[in-house]
Image (cartoon, rainbow, N blue to C red):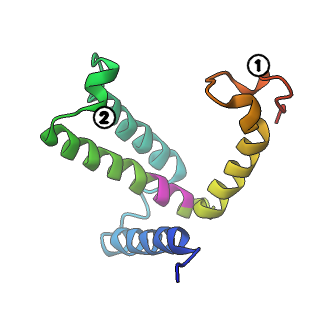
């Protein structure tokens, strides 16, 4: 039997571990939404740095050492995102599911299939 809440449970566990990690170091004082958002953007830029100037093919076939580096940068992005959501009292799992439902309405499969157009350019696309 699968746990339909497994992803949410993982996010909650991660949130709780991050909260404890910060509390053990008295870092909550520095973890303002502004600071966390800025750190998140900085880490996302470090992800992008690994792909700059690569061809689409090369970006999909990273050497193992680069994949490990990218995995660590992605983890940093996730950690700051989870911490930011915690500080703003946002249930990240719930917000993601809500946004997925919104996107499903904006990008109906029959109109968006195989297209990278913004929803406003799809026939029947919803403005939300």
Give coordinates of residue 111: x percent, y percent.
Answer: 75, 29
Q: How crowded is mark 1: few (under 14 residues within 10 Å), some or many (20 or more)?
A: few
First in residue order: circle 1 vs circle 2: 2
Farthest residue to the left: give it: 65
Q: Nearer the viewer, residue 86 or 66?
A: 66
The residue drawn where x is 62% and y is 54% is 96
Instruction: Evaluate whether residue 104 shows in this view.
Output: yes
- Residue 121 bears which disc, if any? 1
110 to the left or right of 59:
right
Q: With 77 as the anchor, is 49 left or right in this view?
A: left
Residue 21 magenta? no
- SS of the residue at dot 2? helix
Q: Does the magenta stretch include residue 82?
A: yes
Measuring 52% from the left and 45% from the top, which residue is drawn there? 34
The residue under the point 26% across, 41% down is 70
- Span highlighted in magenta in the image: 81-85
Residue visible at 42% across and 53% down?
A: 78
Residue 10 - label: none
In the rendered image, which quarter contains the C terminus? top right
In this rendering, the answer to whether 67 lies above or below 57 is below
Which x, y percent locates residue 15? 46, 69
Which residue position holds label 2?
46
């Amino acid at each position: 039997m699968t746990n339909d809440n497994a992803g949410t449970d993982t996010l909650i566990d991660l949130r709780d571990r991050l909260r404890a990690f910060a509390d053990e170091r008295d870092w909550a004082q520095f973890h303002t939404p502004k600071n966390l958002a800025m750190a998140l953007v900085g880490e996302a830029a470090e992800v992008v740095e690994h792909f700059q100037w690569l061809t689409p093919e090369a970006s999909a076939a990273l050497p193992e050492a680069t994949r490990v580096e990218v995995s660590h940068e992605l983890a940093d992005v996730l950690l700051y995102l989870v911490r930011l959501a915690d500080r703003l009292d946002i249930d990240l799992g719930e917000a993601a599911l809500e946004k997925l439902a919104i996107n499903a309405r904006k990008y109906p499969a029959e109109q968006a299939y195989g297209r990278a157009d913004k929803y406003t350019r799809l026939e029947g696309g919803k403005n939300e």
